[in-house]
Image (cartoon, rainbow, N blue to C red):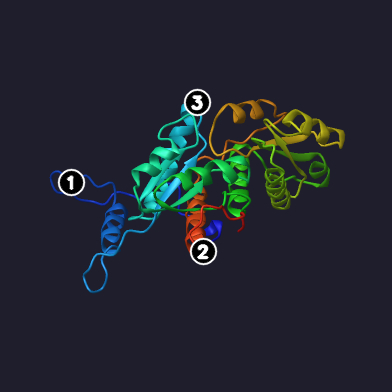
């Protein structure tokens, strides 16, 4: 999958004419999706096919209401892309529904847990698998979202929205740099994943990209900015490597000497990537609660 295959981030135009009384359809595309979702559940001999395993999107949780709003928008995008797929939300902490409650509601059904997390770490390795083990549902745990090229393209688009432009000449290129601001973790694998994303973004932008962290790891964003300045790079942007707005993303953006991008948010490619991780997990032949390593 490439970024060129992503749908436009806009609704389809309304069709002419009035819908039947009591029926409210936003677009022809939505109608066709609904029809398709019903047909997909019926086999050629007319019997009803079993529903696919549920997708449980596992968010961290946040006290910032913008985070929950972002995740709900992302869920809506996933449902639009994959009609007929049962999609649920569960949080590790701070927000309802909590993951154990979501899994309890699935009974003994099948589910794929997709972490809305950008790297390996304690939540991916311990919290989510333990919740899956304790549930009656038959589960698989997908890899975290990162690193992945779709994340890099999303970071690039968010930087462009914030005002980033390619250096006009060699002198400007030598003065430019980016700090990739991430949440941070004490798990060394998380730092490995973030550094890989930074390397991919550096290739995309053609300037150095230094990873930095809001907590639990070094360097901080101000330290990374100073490190770039010591190398003569004063045209420095902060790329917000967060899934949704919150305290960490706000603090990191405030440390930007020039521009700071918005978090990844509900960008269309995020929904595609979540479904990609879901499909990857289903492609494994053994049901497991151990997350796979992130890969493209």
Q: Secondary structure at mark 3?
A: loop
In the rendered image, residue 251, in percent from the top left (x then y), is placed at 64, 26
- Residues marked 3 and 2 touching at CB (< 8 Å): no
Residue 75: percent from left, percent from top: 41, 44
Between discs 3 and 2, the one toward the N terminus:
3
Residue 11 appears in the picture as rendered = no
Residue at image point 52% right, 55% down: 277
Residue 206 in sight from this viewpoint: yes
Could you give the CA–CA distance between mark 1 and mark 2, rounded to whole angstroms?
41 Å
Identify the image quadrant of the N terminus.
bottom right
Circle 1/circle 2 CB separation < 8 Å: no
Q: CA distance from mark 1 to mark 3?
A: 37 Å
Tell me what residue is drawn at x 57 percent, y 37 percent: 263
First in sequence: mark 1 or mark 3?
Answer: 1
Could you tell whether 136 is left or right of 218 in the image?
A: left
Left-right relation of 94 to 153? left
Give the residue displayed 70% in from the left and 34% down from the top.
213
Residue with the mark numbered 1? 23
Label at residue 63: 3
- Name, please, the residue furthest toward the bottom: 45
In this image, 85 relative to 264: left or right?
A: left
* Mark 2 secondary-structure assignment: loop
Look at the image and tell me in which quarter the C terminus lies.
bottom right
Contact between labelled residues 3 and 1, with CB atoms less than 8 Å apart: no
Question: From mark 3 to mark 2, how far is it between C-alphas?
Answer: 35 Å
Judging depth in this view, the residue of 216 and 69 nearest the camera is: 216
Task: Mark 1 vs mark 3: give the one in front.
Answer: 3
Label whose residue precedes the other's in the sequence (1 or 2): 1
**Residue 37 x, y percent position in the rendering:** 30, 58
Residue 289 position, x and y percent, is: 51, 52
Q: What residue is shown with label 2?
A: 284
């Amino acid at each position: 999958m490439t970024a060129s295959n992503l749908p436009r981030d806009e609704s389809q135009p309304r069709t002419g004419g009035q819908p039947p009384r009591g029926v409210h359809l936003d677009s022809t595309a939505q109608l066709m999706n609904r029809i398709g979702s019903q047909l997909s559940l019926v086999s050629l001999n007319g019997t009803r096919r079993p529903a696919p395993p549920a997708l449980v999107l596992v968010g961290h949780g946040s006290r910032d209401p913008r985070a929950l709003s972002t995740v709900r928008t992302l869920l809506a995008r996933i449902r639009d892309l994959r009609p007929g797929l049962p999609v649920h939300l569960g949080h590790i902490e701070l927000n309802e529904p909590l993951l154990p409650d979501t899994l309890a509601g699935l009974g003994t059904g099948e589910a794929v847990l997709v972490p809305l997390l950008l790297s390996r770490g304690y939540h991916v390795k311990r919290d989510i698998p333990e919740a899956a083990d304790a549930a009656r549902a038959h589960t698989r745990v997908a890899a975290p979202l990162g690193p992945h090229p779709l994340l890099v393209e999303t970071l690039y688009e968010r930087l462009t929205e914030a005002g980033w432009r390619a250096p006009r000449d060699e002198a400007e290129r030598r003065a430019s740099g980016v700090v990739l601001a991430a949440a941070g973790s004490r798990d060394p694998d998380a730092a490995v994943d973030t550094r890989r994303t930074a390397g991919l973004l550096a290739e995309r932008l053609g300037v150095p990209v230094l990873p930095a962290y809001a907590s639990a790891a070094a360097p901080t964003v101000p330290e990374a900015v100073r490190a770039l300045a010591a190398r003569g790079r004063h045209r420095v942007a902060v790329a917000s490597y967060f899934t949704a707005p919150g305290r960490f993303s706000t603090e990191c953006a405030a440390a930007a000497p020039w521009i700071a991008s918005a978090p990844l948010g509900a960008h269309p490619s995020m929904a595609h990537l979540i479904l990609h991780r879901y499909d990857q997990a289903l492609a494994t032949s053994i049901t497991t609660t151990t997350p796979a390593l992130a890969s493209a």
